[in-house]
Image (cartoon, helix red, strand yellow):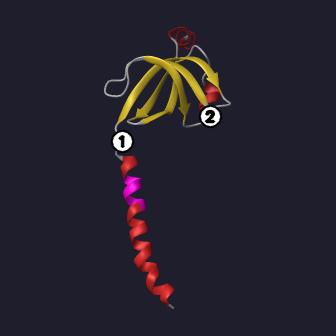
Amino acid sequence: MYFHRLLPIVGMPLLLISACFGQSTAVKKSHPFHGKVEAINEGSKSLRVNGEKVEGWMEAMTMDYKVDDPAAFKKVKAGDQITATVYDGDPVLHKVEVIPSSSSESKSKK
């Protein structure tokens, strides 16, 4: 009987706390990322990328980055230039896309 009275008292603060944590991840600033893939490691779900400087986020450097979508490993290969989105405090590449090389663009236009 007392359980039914305690449920709203305990449940409401938990609901509010979870809503606050959910909002904190949504306000992270996004940055465009550009780099060249040097290696692919599907086992660790990461790409070794020689990344350009990202203003307000990171200096230019080569490092391993986790990827948010495993489908990226089907379209990315070593040597590809990529773009992605990164977020403050999150070293994961989001929305990875391969930048078409000028030679493949020339072939597709012919």
Is residue 47 found left or right of 50 in the rendered image?
right
What separation in Å lies between label 2 and label 1 (alpha carbons)?
Answer: 24 Å
Residue 14 versus residue 31 in the image, above or below: below
* Residue drawn at point x = 64 percent, y = 25 percent: 41
Q: Quadrant where the C terminus lies?
A: top right
* Residue drawn at point x = 43 percent, y = 60 percent: 18
Residue 100 versus residue 86 in the image, above or below: above
Q: Nearer the viewer, residue 105 or 1?
A: 1
Q: Amino acid at mark 1?
A: Lys
Q: Secondary structure at mark 2?
A: loop
Residue 20 position, x and y percent, is 37, 58
Residue 99, can we see it? no
In magenta stretch: residue 14? no
Q: Quadrant of residue 59?
A: top left
Q: Main secondary structure of the magenta part?
A: helix
Give, as a single range, the part of the protein colored magenta: 18-23
Q: Nearer the viewer, residue 82 or 53?
A: 53
Residue 4 versus residue 20 in the image, above or below: below
Which residue has dot 1 on it?
Answer: 28
Which residue has dot 2 on it?
Answer: 71
In magenta stretch: residue 19? yes
Q: Amino acid at mark 2?
A: Ala
Residue 68 position, x and y percent, is 54, 37
Residue 48 position, x and y percent, is 56, 21
